[in-house]
Image: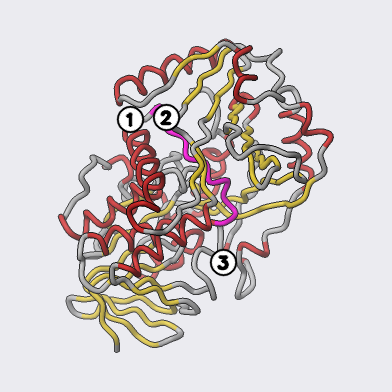
Amino acid sequence: MQTADVIVIGGGIWGLSTAYHLARRNAGRVVVLERNQQLAAETTPQSAGQIGQLRGDPVLARAVGYTLDTVSQFAAQTGHDAAFVRSGSIHVALCDERALQFEQLERVAQEIGYPVRRIEPADITQFAPTVNVDSVRAALHVPNDGYVDAGACALAYGAAARDQGASCLTNCQVTQVCRSGSTWQITTSQGAWQAAHLIITGGAWTQSLTRQIGFTAPMYPIRLQQARTLADGVAESHPVIRVPDESCYIRPERNAYLFGYFDPDPLPINLDQQPPGFSTRDVRPEPVLIRTAIERLTKILPRLTQLSIDEFRQGMMTCTPDGKFVIGPVPDADNVLVATGCGGTGIAASAAIGRWLSEWVCDGAPSEEVAQYDPARFGNQTADDEWLRSAACATSAAYYRLR
């Protein structure tokens, strides 16, 4: 049996960020176990990779700010490129109620101290010349925002973690997790491991792992759908455009437009009902949703209707009953941490989540007050699969809803 100080199950962007931050803290032998042939092979590379700091929750806004700082300096500090583009972002309001919400978001930004400025609708074309501003009631420009190639960013975290002594094992399927005295025993397809600390960042498969130690992680996998057009000369510096009143977003990728839509009727994916070996690659594209996204975005970007789709992209984001992350100690399981419930914000908060988890291991608690993400906050309700599925779908559908 091999031993480690900390084992991280799941080599997506959260797991690799965690390994990087643990290695930076000299947390001992850190080992990442990933079931796929490659790291960051499931939902991470399917993500839009947007890192936007405009948030109503100050904790989340600071988390995204830390990620922005981390990825923008990553190559200089580690020698590994996190594939970050500081394009800025523009949020557009199509109704007066949304414009009022923007005022609240501005106040949060001012409290935290990151730059946000209200711009006239006509000024949007200075940043994005093809945008039609006729229906825009208000707009906010966030200059420090940007986006990453999420897969490349995750691999950069992993490479930097290995440089500092962490190990990442692929083709390593975890088959059993159990307590063994004062440590945890993890049985895998490549043999058994023992570790004092266990961190579960298994994405859509997190729940199957936490159940083995008596805890149902309060999240449910929801289908994620987006698409990329054929190349159209779109500059990488084109800002991310968020259109919350249409539940849509769009950004540049490979000289084209990458865009997505939060489905008002989300599709939950019950992994217990899927065949062995099921993966993100088996999630089927839904062209009807993409056509709906195009229709919704047309009033802002008419050019979109003239472009063919080059790639459908789909994954599984994990959603929670209240739309907040699940991060922290697993109840009644000493030295086990879980992180799940990305809810469409996983890339944007990835560096902060890795830091918080490393601080739990090294310091006993994170430097930020994150009680709102407590894994135990829903009590015994999570044992009701129907309730969990319904609540997770509701929060996904309401991602951009006015509150």
The magenta stretch is: 45-56
Identified at 30% across, 26% down, the residue is 112
Q: How far apart are labels 2 and 3 at the CA level?
A: 34 Å
Q: Which residue is mark 2?
A: 55
Task: Name the residue beneath numbered marker 1.
Answer: 58
Q: Quadrant of residue 269?
A: bottom right
Q: Quadrant of the N terminus?
A: bottom left
- State the residue in front, 36 or 212: 36
What distance separates the C-alpha of mark 1 from that of mark 3?
A: 36 Å
Q: Is residue 64 above or below residue 342?
A: above
Q: Are marks 1 and 3 in contact (CB under 8 Å)?
A: no
Give me the C-alpha separation between circle 2 and circle 1. 7 Å
Query: Residue shown at 35%/26% (left/top)?
Result: 114
The percent position of residue 338, horizontal first and vertical second, equals 34, 58
* Nearer to us in this view, 53 or 270: 53
Numbered circle sitting on residue 377: none
Q: Dot 2: few (<14), some (14–19), or many (≥20) neighbours within 10 Å? A: some
Task: Give yes or no for residue 8 being in the magenta stretch.
Answer: no
- Tag 2: amino acid: Arg
Image-quadrant location for residue 115: top left
Mark before the other along the chain sequence, 2 or 3: 2
Please give the name of the residue rendered at 47% of the width and 76% of the height, measured from the top-left corner.
170
Q: Secondary structure at mark 2?
A: loop
Q: Are marks 2 and 1 in contact (CB under 8 Å)?
A: yes
Mark with earlier residue (1, 3): 1
Q: Is residue 131 left or right of residue 11?
A: right
| Residue topped by disc 3 | 272
